[in-house]
Image (spheres, rainbow, N blue to C red):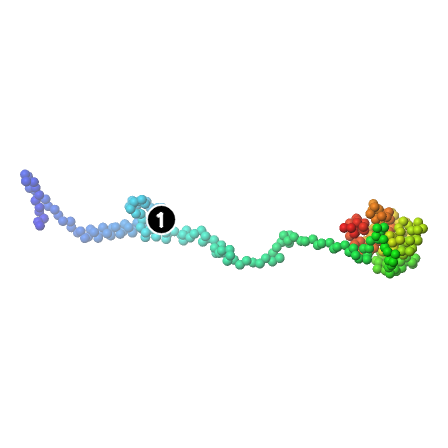
Amino acid sequence: MSSDIRLYPEDHEPKAIKIRKPKHTKRNIIVAVICAVLIVGLGAAAWVFFGNSGLPKLPFGSSEGGGSAVSESEQSEESSSLPESSSLPESSSLPESSSLPESSAPALPLSSESVPESSVPEESPEPNPIPRDEWYMLLVNKEHPLSADFSIAAKAVDADGHTVDERIYDDLSAMLSDAKAEGIDLRIVTAYRSYSRQQQLYEAGATTAAAGTSEHNSGLAVDILTASGEFEGSSGEAWLLEHAAEYGFILRYPKDKESVTGFAYEPWHFRYVGKEQAKLISESGLCLEEYLAQ
């Protein structure tokens, strides 16, 4: 085909139009490719160096249209430029022990030492029961008389021949001796009386207590005065009221208890009930009848 083509209308004089073929076609393609590679490479380098925020968005599409302007390889490069900690979940910043389930931690046994003493309630000890059946707790009064055949193993406690139940001898002797060492001279004026002797005194009107109803018939009681014959309001009375319980004795017929004991107030009459019970009765403020009735 000839490079000169005559194109002209039929009614005009024809003119020659020459069409030239482009030269260096391959070279232009190579240059274009190299430029494109350089542009893409510079763009990628700028993306990595400045980050996503420093570059304008490329108008190669939108999120709603035909695909994203950023390729998957560029997205991976963006993610690789972020610090490693940003790709970790928040739980990875916790210590390893927090990621373990509770059941995986071994349960430690609780020892008594780990519990505060104040959190452990202490049970108050129960008081010992009253030893009502013991010989030293024998109740003798007008409602609880001794039988005519009641007897004791008597022992003399002084030079005047006063006797008591031998089981109270040691404590009674110690009480009189300790009082004397402190300048208190105490004397026994009445101690044990037999059933028959009590009956004689009662019939003679010397006492209001019939045989068997007086504590003197038990051998556990004594009437005590000072050497001068005084007692109420004396130093001897004060000493006994303070110390008698230490030796096992109580004031048997206190004031304001006549309706309970059946006998008038006798500040000199002391009865043996044992050291432990004497302390408890004295602290309670009860007479023997009231104490045993608990």
Kindly identify the amino acid type of the residue bearing the numbered disc 1: Gly
**View extreme (top): residue:** 11
* Percent x, y of residue 156: 89, 59
* Percent x, y of residue 243: 82, 53
Q: From where the camera sits, is residue 188 visible?
A: no
Which residue is depicted at the point 47% across and 53% down?
94
The residue lying toward the viewer, choosing from 95 and 161, is 161
Instruction: Read off the residue under disc 1.
Output: 51
Q: From where the camera sits, is residue 2 visible?
A: yes
Q: Residues within 10 Å of mark 1 (few under 14, many from 20)?
A: some
Q: Quadrant of residue 136?
A: bottom right
The residue lying toward the viewer, choosing from 234 and 11, is 234
Which residue is depicted at the point 30% across and 49% down?
43
* Percent x, y of residue 59: 29, 44
Secondary structure under the numbered disc 1 in the rendered image: loop
Q: Quadrant of residue 277?
A: bottom right
Q: Quadrant of residue 181?
A: bottom right
* Percent x, y of residue 2: 8, 49
Which residue is depicted at the point 5% across and 38% down?
11
The residue lying toward the viewer, choosing from 86 and 266, is 266
Count of numbered circles on the image: 1
